[in-house]
Amino acid sequence: MTDADAGRDIDTTEPGRAWTFGDDIDTDQIIPSRFLVSSDPAELGEHAFNDLRPEFAPNVADGDFVVGGHNFGSGSSREHAPISLLGAGIDGIVAQSFARIFFRNGINLGLPVLICPDADRIDDGDEISLRLDEGAVVNHTADERYDADPLPEFLQNLVDRGGLEPYTRAKLGTE
C-alpha cells in the first residue's frame, strides 16, 4: 500500500521497531501546536512527539510502529497528528483503543490503525509487524501473536489505496 501524503510505500508485514506510549496520548503530545505552521508530512514528522519523547523523531525509521494504550489520539480533530506520524516513517499504529476522530483520520490518510487489547504486552523496542487482513499483531521479539480487530473491508480498501483521496480518485477514474 502507498501513502500518498508521505510519498512512500507502507508494508505492515515487515518487522519494525515498536515505539510504545501509555494511555491518553493526545494530539498535542503527538505534534505540539507550535509546529503546526506546515502541513508537509516530512516537516511535521521532524517534530513528532517532540515534547513527550524528544528521542523519537531523530531515531524513528521508515517501517517502525507506534504502540499506544487506551484513548490514543484524543484531543483535537486536526489531521496533523497522523500526518506527522506518516512523515516520520511510521507504518502503523496499534493501541488498546483510539479516539474516534484520530482513528478515522488515520484511515482517511492511509495510515494503518489496529485496535489490540494486548497492545500493553508489547515492549518499547520490540520488533513487530501487523497482519491487517487477519487482525493480528506479531511480536517477533517475544515470539507472540496478539489478536486485533480487523478493519471492515471498506475501511481496509481505503488504507490499501493510501487513504480517502486516492481511493476516491480511483473510484472516479481520475487517478
Image (spheres, grey):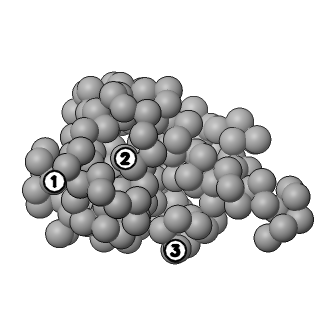
Give the mark toward the camera: 3 or 1: 1
Question: Which picture quadrant has residue 23?
Answer: top left
Give the number of the disc on residue 73: none
Q: Amino acid at mark 3?
A: Arg
Name the spot of residue 171 as percent of width and height, x first: 86, 56
- Categorize mark 3 by other alpha carbons within 10 Å: few (<14), some (14-19), many (20+): some
Q: Which residue is mark 1?
A: 50
Q: Amino acid at mark 2?
A: Ala
Quick one: 161 or 39, which is closer to the camera? 39
Residue at image coords 63%, 65%: 1
Amino acid type, residue under disc 1 in the picture: Asn
For mark 1, does the 10 Å Cα neighbourhood hold few (<14), some (14 to 19), or many (20 or more) residues? Answer: some
N-term mark: 3 or 1? 3
- Marks 3/1 in contact by CB < 8 Å: the verdict is no
Q: CA distance from mark 3 to mark 1?
A: 23 Å
Q: Position of residue 172 (x, y in %)?
A: 88, 58
Label 2, label 1: how many angstroms apart (C-alpha)?
12 Å
Q: Nearer the viewer, residue 145 or 152?
A: 152
Residue drawn at 23 percent across, 54 percent down: 35
Q: How many marks?
A: 3
* Residue beneath disc 3: 8
Label 1: element kind: loop
The residue carrying mark 2 is 81
Give the percent coordinates (x, y) of residue 26. Answer: 28, 33
The answer to whether residue 148 is seen in the rendering is no
Query: Upstream in the sequence, badge 2 or badge 1?
Result: 1
**Front residue of this view, candidates 113 and 133:** 113
Q: Residue at (56%, 36%) from the top-left corner?
A: 104
Image quarter of residue 120: top left
